[in-house]
Amino acid sequence: MQLFLIDSTLRDGEQAPGVFFLKKEKIRLAQMLSEIGIDEIEIGTPSMGRCECDTIRDIMRLNLKSVISVWSRAIKKDIEKASTLGVDGIHIAFPLSNIQLHAMNKTYKWVEDTLDETVQCAKGLFKQVSIGIQDASRSSLKRIIQFIDMLKKYEIFRIRLADTVGILTPIKTIKIIQAVKKKNMNIDFHAHNDFGMATANAVTAYQIGANFLSVTVNGLGERAGNAALEEVLVTLKCIGVDFKYDISTLFDLCKYVSIISRRPLPVGKAICGQFAVSHESGIHTHAVLSNMLAFQPFNGKVIGREDFSILFGKHSGKNAIISCLKKQNIKIKNCEVPLLIKKIKNKAYELQRSLSADEIVNLYLNKNV
């Protein structure tokens, strides 16, 4: 099954608390996503106002390879406004769970009464129409299927199942996707990360039949965020999914989004964290020096970062230290290694952190340290 990725960093990502992208940042981000080969970029919500619409128009002038879409409420005037921007597609979200309908002062009858006018309007204005089940994970499966059955006659491009508050587990995700898959429609799965399972749920959704996945760079998004583009991409590549994306600049993309969102990447963040391909333990470093994949699942160079790195501290072993010095054309005698290891451990304890290769060289050359 072919995989299609929808990146929503410019829409859902910017909805994260405290995040605000400048126009030039949005333009550059859209270019970077397109260069990777992201199939579709959801670039904003036109109803937010003139500045949002101006940015969308500017991005459209780039003639990117990716399909460009926008997000909309199920309101006719919002859909009509979005149609003036020249984008390829629109995603229209309908709240379906009782809790969201009540919060919005709506009923399920409103959904039924609104659907025809909304979809017919969008179909007449856009090449690609996606309809979203907002809060699908807290809607009954019976209601989800009933809603999809109502959509069948319109021949829309796809349905989006949104785990709006991030409560799904992979097992529950399987049950929903399996039921919806029987309706023979393109399925987009949109995961949130409130319980830390967005990437797992997204990958599971694809494996069971969702051919579209909505993601954001670094998992940026409301509350705890969304399924992370880089995590989904590298996971699917490593498990052998037929792959068409160029991820050689993925690390640069993640760093860029970290900068413009003013959200530093945690050092232990999967894929792109500072220490995601780093090793200190003597057992691990000895193994990765022989075969990098012994203790990490992918070569960091695949995403444009270092293949792996070795740090030094209380867990370091002699092989990593000898290798470190050898790379600097320094040959250490076997009898000197125990003393250097002791110095390294003392220094790491003193500084309360790991040491770099340069610091190891300095410790060795400065015999009195």
Image (spheres, rainbow, N blue to C red):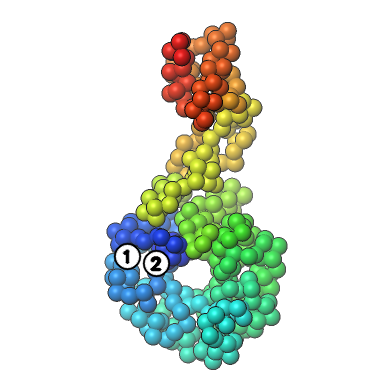
Amino acid of disc 2? Ile
Image point (44%, 77%), residue name:
72
Amino acid of disc 1? Ile
Q: Taking 158 as reference, is 10 above or below it?
A: above
Helix, strand or loop for disc 1: helix
Closer to the camera in the image, 277 or 350: 350
Residue 9 left/right relative to 164: left
- Residue furthest to the front in view is 350
Q: Earlier in the sequence, mark 1 or mark 2?
A: 2
Q: Taking 84 as reference, is 267 above or below it?
A: above
Image coordinates of residue 143 in percent, x first then y, are 65, 81
Crowding at label 2, few (<14), some or many (≥20) Cα neighbours within 10 Å?
many
Helix, strand or loop for disc 2: loop
Image coordinates of residue 111 in percent, x first then y, are 55, 86
Crowding at label 1, few (<14), some or many (≥20) Cα neighbours within 10 Å?
many
What residue would you read off at disc 1? 59
Image point (53%, 59%), residue name:
224
Q: Quadrant of residue 174?
A: bottom right
What residue would you read off at disc 2? 43
